[in-house]
Image (spheres, helix red, strand yellow):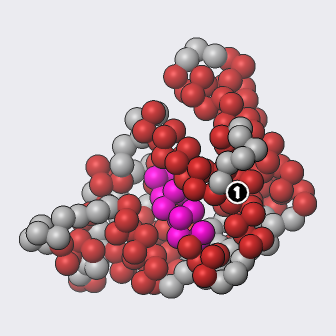
Amino acid sequence: MEAYVCGEPNPLTDMICEEGLRRLSRSILPGCRQDNPRARADLSFAAMLGGMAITNAKLGAAHGLASALGGKISAPHSVITARLAPFVMRENMRAAKQNGRNDLLTRYRKISQLLTEDSDAQMEDGIEWVNQMLDKLEIPTLSYYGLCDTAFDVVAQDALKSVAIQGNPLPLTEDRLVEVLNQVCYCPVNQASSDKTRRGDLSEMH
């Protein structure tokens, strides 16, 4: 998905991404939850297409944050990226609306239509689809892996240094990345360590 909405898409990767999303949509549940060789072949092909797409286009904030979190929590890179994806999608949609980027909003709408297999789907439907798949596949939340114990400001700073985030369709500030992490890992305001959880202590990361 990130290669499709990155800052430098191209006709080749658009075609590759769209076909990969079609195969992912129709095969992710039967391929992961059933003994369905055809669906698993579909997913393997979709994964290959994803690799081709990111090789010939760019990534975005989900991968940038995932690379920053990789050494800080004990979650697989795939799980981190997947759980971040819907929150980054929402943040990019917000920024696109604010900056009049109708081209980007159109791309997010197309993603939703491909994932839901509904030509009338709206942008937000894609976010809902991703969340539903994560829950149906019982992918653990990032709080399970200790996200709430990380220093969000340090994570955001590290993410901004990554190559991946340079491909995000719109620049996101440290504050916006921290807000994304806050949304991913909501911590009650009456929790004693809420300040530390949300912003973090730089000294603890060294």
Residue 202 in percent (x, y) is at 28, 83
Q: Give the range drawn in magenta.
A: 81-93
Disc 1 element: helix
Q: Up-down: is 137 above or below 73?
A: above
- Is there any visible trace of residue 78 in the rendered image? no
Residue 171 is left or right of residue 68, and the answer is right
Which residue is disc 1 drawn over? Answer: 109
Residue found at x 66% / y 40%: 116
Q: Quadrant of residue 201?
A: bottom left
Residue 175 in percent (x, y) is at 42, 84
- Judged from this view, the residue extending furthest toward the right is 11
The quadrant the C terminus occupies is bottom left
Residue found at x 53% / y 70%: 91
Q: Up-down: is 103 above or below 175?
A: above
Question: How many marks do you count on the picture?
Answer: 1
Residue found at x 52% / y 48%: 128
Q: Up-down: is 99 above or below 117?
A: below
Q: Between 191 and 35, which is closer to the camera in this rendering?
A: 191
Classified by dominant secondary structure, the portion drawn in magenta counts as helix
Q: Between 199 and 105, which is closer to the camera in this rendering?
A: 105
The quadrant the N terminus occupies is bottom right
Q: Up-down: is 206 above or below 142?
A: below
